[in-house]
Amino acid sequence: MPSRLRVRREVLRDVAALRDELARCPADPVARSSPTARAALVLDAVAENGAVRVESSRLDADGPVNDRFVSCARSVFEGKRLVVSGTAPGRRLRLVIPLGPNGNALSLPAASVTESGPADGG
């Protein structure tokens, strides 16, 4: 598996390339109940030869967000194949993309990628 930094850079490059699709998502701002409230879109992906495929996504939030934006963003990501050179099949990755302060945009610079184990769960 390539370095985590390289995987993050390549995944975020492909996520950023989805900008036009994400721009069609409803972007009405949502008032946060607390300035420290956090929210993130969590993408679970599995590595394939030279790519990772987003299998599922979920919202992880402790405050209000634009639910229509989140639903739309999830539909953009699920099933997408993101090119990552040197990936070997079978590893699971988790991409966490924080939502911006208004709960209606993705904060790509703050995104993280972690390896979460083999595809077979073992």
Image (cartoon, rainbow, N blue to C red):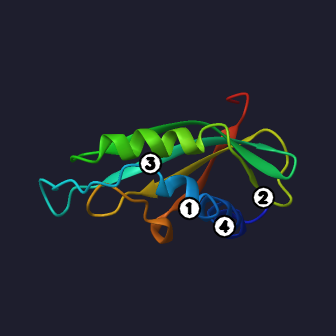
Residue receiving disc 4: 13
Q: CA distance from mark 3 to mark 2?
A: 20 Å
Residue receiving disc 2: 84
Q: Quadrant of the C terminus?
A: top right
- What residue appears at the point 85 percent right and 53 percent down from the top-left corner? 50
Residue type (three-letter) at the residue carrying disc 1: Arg
Residue 5 falls in image quadrant: bottom right
Q: Residues within 10 Å of mark 3 (few under 14, many from 20)?
A: many
- What residue appears at the point 73 percent right and 28 percent down from the top-left corner? 120
- Along the line of sight, the residue nearer the viewer: 23 or 17: 23
N-term mark: 3 or 1: 1
- Along the line of sight, the residue nearer the viewer: 19 or 118: 19
N-term mark: 3 or 2: 3
Residue receiving disc 1: 19
- What residue appears at the point 60 percent right and 64 percent down from the top-left corner? 16
Q: CA distance from mark 1 to mark 2?
A: 18 Å
Kindly check if marks 3 and 2 are in contact, taking CB atoms under 8 A apart as contact: no
Per the rendering, the mark at residue 41 is: 3
Q: Residues within 10 Å of mark 4 (few under 14, many from 20)?
A: some
Residue type (three-letter) at the residue carrying disc 2: Val
Q: CA distance from mark 4 to mark 2?
A: 10 Å
- What residue appears at the point 15 percent right and 56 percent down from the top-left corner? 31
Q: Nearer the viewer, mark 1 or mark 2?
A: 1
Residue type (three-letter) at the residue carrying disc 4: Arg
N-term mark: 4 or 1: 4
